[in-house]
Image (tube, rainbow, N blue to C red):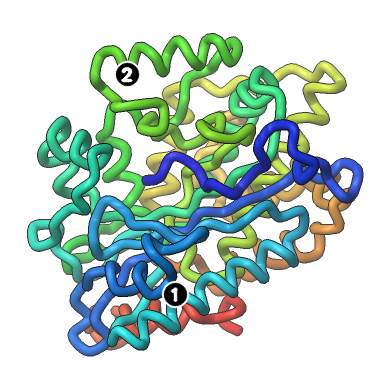
């Protein structure tokens, strides 16, 4: 829900913005988590955790729109190893203060048993705007995501990158899907969180944009018509960072394991890098009809990795593993250049083997019929260093 990871990319002009290795792009990740009582499994107030982490959460943590949610933010990272270490440190810090407060931390797009009717809102002006303007849509906004920032200094270039990565957003959604349950019931969706966002007028896949000025004009109109309170409340699935010079990917559900968050970051950075390579050599942007982009995103939310997904450029249904392999082939060269190929391709294949979080949750529920067991699994996986490690 936040506007940007405040430390995800450097302030323009800072030496920290220069890559220590030629060709590498900076990364930063925001992760949103649910907080729940360790015994009852009911969602709980994140306030004691924020206090324990330092003031209003300190440098790397902050409150979210619902009191039972909390957000963590990494600093600038140039390698997946550094990013993994920060993600691990932040999760361990959260889990530690939660344990002292008799609570647990859960990384998932929705909380399996939480009822939005019984959860209030964090009293802040920006959140108040959403609550007052959107009524029932805001009432049901009890969801968590994972946002990846990739450093791109030039704003027009960032917009051109956005145009090029849009066809690949659905597979990022399918890989991260972690929200099969809603208000205590199975939804039939792998990412029900995506359907919650799809109803909002300033969310979803962005339009094809001609330039950063075009982007700014569209955002201004959304603000002037009171659709959004500010630029940070234009919640497109990919957008230029609003506080720092990044491309921000917002499509993913909260990633249950650290491995899945690292996979999202690695793929997102590689997609940006590949787009920059294409721009440099004057290659045309892929053409994907708006209706197929919309349908591809819906199908990824509905089925995740179970079944066939839409390749919006090819205009065809393909098995999910084929779509994943097409993405890996598309970003192979930038992954090799960054030294990330083995890790990212290995993580993608691990998710295909063990399935995404949504499928893992469904398997647990099918075995016992108890959502409490699903929550226990999520708690364990949130703390895990590796996917099924």
Residue 43 image offset from top left, x and y in percent: 22, 72
Q: Kindly indicate whether the residue at mark 2 contacts the one at mark 1 (C-beta within 8 angstroms).
A: no
Quarter-wise, where is residue 326 in the image? top right
- For residue 307, say whether it is visible: no
- Residue at (62, 35) in percent of width and height: 246
Between 372 and 240, the residue placed more toward the observer is 240
Up-down: is 342 above or below 220?
below
Quick one: which residue is furthest to the front in this view?
Answer: 55
User: Looking at the picture, how far across and down is residue 234, in whole percent?
Assistant: 38, 29
**Spot occupied by residue 379 in the image (x, y as percentages of width and height):** 39, 80
Kind of element beneath mark 2:
helix
**For mark 1, what is the residue?**
94
> Which residue is found at the position 59% from the left and 10% from the top?
210
- The residue singled out by tag 2 in the image is 223
Q: Earlier in the sequence, mark 1 or mark 2?
A: 1
The picture places residue 29, in percent across and down from the top left corner, at: 57, 54
The quarter of the rendered structure image containing the C terminus is bottom right
Q: Residue at x 58, y 76 (%)?
A: 387
Separation (CA) of disc 1 from disc 2 = 35 Å
Q: Which residue is depicted at the point 28% across and 68% down? A: 47
């Amino acid at each position: 829900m936040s506007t940007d990871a405040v430390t995800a990319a450097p302030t323009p002009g800072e030496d920290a913005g220069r890559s220590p290795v030629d060709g590498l792009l900076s990364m930063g990740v925001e992760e949103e988590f649910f907080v729940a009582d360790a015994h009852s499994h009911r969602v709980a107030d994140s306030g004691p955790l924020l206090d324990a982490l330092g003031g209003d959460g300190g440098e790397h943590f902050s409150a979210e729109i619902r009191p039972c949610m909390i957000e963590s933010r990494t600093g600038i990272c140039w390698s997946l190893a550094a990013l993994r270490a920060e993600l691990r440190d932040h999760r361990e810090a959260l889990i530690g203060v939660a344990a002292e407060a008799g609570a647990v931390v859960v990384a998932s797009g929705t909380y399996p048993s939480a009822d939005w009717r019984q959860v209030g809102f964090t009293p802040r002006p920006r959140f108040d705007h959403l609550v007052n303007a959107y009524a029932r849509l805001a009432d049901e906004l009890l969801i968590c995501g994972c946002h990846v920032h990739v450093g791109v200094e030039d704003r027009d270039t960032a917009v051109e990158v956005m145009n090029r990565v849009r066809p690949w957003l659905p597979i990022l959604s399918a890989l991260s899907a972690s929200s099969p349950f809603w208000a205590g019931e199975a939804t039939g969706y792998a990412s029900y969180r995506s359907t919650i966002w799809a109803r909002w007028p300033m969310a979803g896949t962005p339009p094809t944009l001609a330039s950063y000025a075009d982007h700014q004009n569209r955002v201004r109109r959304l603000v002037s018509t009171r659709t959004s309170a500010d630029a940070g409340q234009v919640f497109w699935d990919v957008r230029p960072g609003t506080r720092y010079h990044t491309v921000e990917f917002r499509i993913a559900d909260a990633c249950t394991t650290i491995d899945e968050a690292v996979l999202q970051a690695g793929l997102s950075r590689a997609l940006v890098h590949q787009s920059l390579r294409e721009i440099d050599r004057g290659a045309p942007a892929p053409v994907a009809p708006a209706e197929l982009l919309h349908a591809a995103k819906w199908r990824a939310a509905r089925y995740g990795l179970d079944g066939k997904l839409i390749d919006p450029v090819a205009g065809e249904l393909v098995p999910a593993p084929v779509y994943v392999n097409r993405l890996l082939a598309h970003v192979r060269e930038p992954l090799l250049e960054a030294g990330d190929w083995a890790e990212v391709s290995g993580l993608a294949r691990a998710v295909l083997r063990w399935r995404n979080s949504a499928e893992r949750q469904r398997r647990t529920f099918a075995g016992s019929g108890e959502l409490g067991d699903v929550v226990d699994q999520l708690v364990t996986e949130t703390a895990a260093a590796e996917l099924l490690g």
